[in-house]
Amino acid sequence: MQLIVAFGYKIAATRVIVWCILLLLAILGNYLPNLRPNYFVGLRTPWTLESPETWRVTHRLGGKVMFFGSLLLLVLEFFVSEGVFAFLLVSFILLLVLWAFVYSWYHFRTHATRETV
């Protein structure tokens, strides 16, 4: 990006940064279902860390939500204003975090065996 600007071309740096963030989220969303339970990377809630089944289900669905949501935002960026897009981006990230928390709790409570409760 610096070389393009150095050669005299105008570039919307904020757009490029947002594209890179959304592409990163898409790549991470694609990779999430392959993660094994760990304490460092992933949708780490108390329930996903306690139950490997809850970890697997939460990451499988969370990866799909993250991947397709970020691709949808990449497309929507061309059709909505900057203010609306900023609201959509922040809302998507917050809703993803809230969803992962609630879904992992719900799955753990409804699918936990007697030994883990």
Image (tube, grey):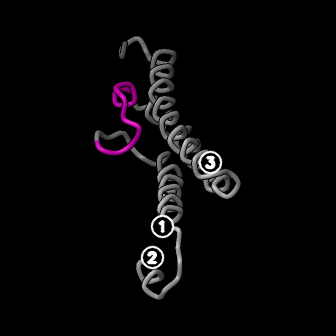
Estimate the x, y position of residue 44 in percent, counting from the top left.
Answer: 36, 35
User: Helix, strand, or loop for circle 1?
Assistant: helix
Q: Which residue is label 3 attached to?
A: 68
Gap between marks 2 and 3, in whole Å? 26 Å
Badge nearest the viewer, 1 or 2? 1
Which residue shows up at 53% across the image and 68% down it? Answer: 12
Residue 71 vertical placement versus 7 (above, below): above
Do we see residue 53 in this rendering? no
| Residue located farthest toward the left when viewing the structure as drawn | 39
What span is colored magenta in the figure? 40-51
Q: In which quarter of the image is the N terminus?
A: bottom left
Determine if the magenta segment contains residue 49.
yes
Q: What residue type is labelled 2?
A: Met
Of the numbered discs 1 and 2, the one sitting upstream in the chain is: 2
Query: Considering only order in the chain, which callout, 1 or 3, is on the residue closer to the N terminus?
Result: 1
Query: Residue 1 got which mark?
Result: 2
SS under mark 2: loop
Q: Are marks 1 and 2 in contact (CB under 8 Å)?
A: yes
Mark 1, residue position? 13
